Image (tube, grey):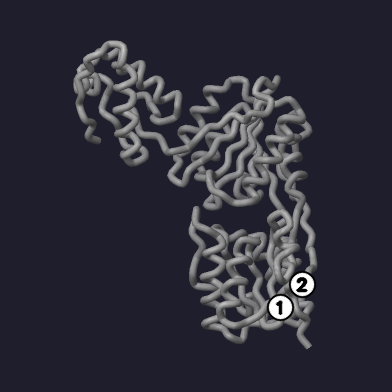
Amino acid sequence: MSIQSSVFKNENSRHNELKACLLDQIGRSDCNMRLPSETALAKQFNVCRATMNKVMVELEREGYVVRRPGKGTFVSPRDKTVESSAARNGSRTVMIAYPDFFAYPLWQAVHFAEMLALKQNLRLINFKMQAETDYATLFHVIQQNPDLEGILMIPPATGMPRPVLRQLDTLNLPCVLQISQENVSIYRNLCTIDWDHFKSGYLRMKALLARGHRKIGFVENEPGRLAATDRGIHHALREYGLRQQHLLRSKTAASPWKDPVETGYHQTAELLEHHPELTALLVDTFPGAYGALRAIDERGLRCPADVSLVTAMDMMSYGRLSRPALTTVLGNSEALIERMFQMILGGRSDVPRHVVQDVELIERESIRTLS
């Protein structure tokens, strides 16, 4: 890393100018890049070691760098910590960590967490993870908050590395992750909660099969295939004497941190291009369904007259008010977040290792019955 040297003429402005120079260079550096030593930087900028140390301590506290004993100082991933304005002076402190990516379910989950924190007089720390996170900043923030009583974790779609799970497991803190059980069942001190993905896949596939559809495409607009969803889909197929090979899939894979609407659009366009015989689509989530509707329309087709569609999730009233209104599988997001709070604050002896949150099929207008 090349940092421009500078001689500071005014003693009073030295600290601020030095910090500004370092921030400028950090902003243009790759994450996890190792910085020169404090001694080398002090010599380069013609300041004393104490001044450089003071600036580096501030940069670490503000999350711009991570200092690792025996290894050096590194540029942090752009993770962000935001303290909720609700109940800043709450008697207990809780953290919610989640990807810094706009998706309605994430926004909704954080909103419900903030409302619950306010009602229960809790101080809530929002920790936003970036795509390049190495989780070092997360553990640093945890160490900086000794009054922390629990962590709600909504992992990225790519999941969490095993070393991170192992480190979370060693914390003397209740930690609840919204993730499927099989991913963390080997750890003793982590609790998990998730939607009933088996039931979600089963209900969606059965809704199409019961209406006579057999030429069905699967739009997987969310990254990270869920084994439970696949099992539910395959269970419904077997009930109708079909195999999983009957389900047509796109060759375009969903990518982490990418727009699921775009992915849904491109996968649907590909499926309709290569499989014009399709009569129905099973779509991962609501954003993908919106992209799918666009792709259907561009081919001069209509939903559900030509292509039926079933999905999961909703955004406020969008699914109900779209044309056609979308048949979807829904769960109670507020109840899921409330259950996560209960799991970290209810006492260790009362906490189940894993909770499966129920879902239900909401039938609307997007599935046609074949004659």
Residue 281 rendering spot, x and y as whole percentages = 65, 74
The reply to whether discs 2 and 1 touch (Cβ–Cβ < 8 Å) is: yes
Residue 341: image quadrant is top right
Q: Which residue is mark 2?
A: 365
Dot 2 or dot 1: first in sequence order is 1
Given residues 263 and 94, the one toward you in this image is 263
Is 315 located above or below residue 277 in the figure?
Answer: above
Note whether 105 is above or below 129 in the view shown: below
Q: Position of residue 363 (x, y in %)?
A: 80, 67
Q: Is residue 203 left or right of residue 138?
A: right
Q: Residue at x 20, y 19 (%)?
A: 7
Q: Which residue is mark 1?
A: 304
> Which residue is depicted at the point 53% across and 39% down?
128
Q: Is residue 71 left or right of residue 46?
A: right
Is there any visible trace of residue 235 in the rendered image?
Answer: no
Q: Residues within 10 Å of mark 2 (few under 14, many from 20)?
A: some
Image height check: is 205 above or below 9?
below
**x and y percent of residue 309 in the render?**
68, 73
Residue drawn at 57 percent across, 42 percent down = 98
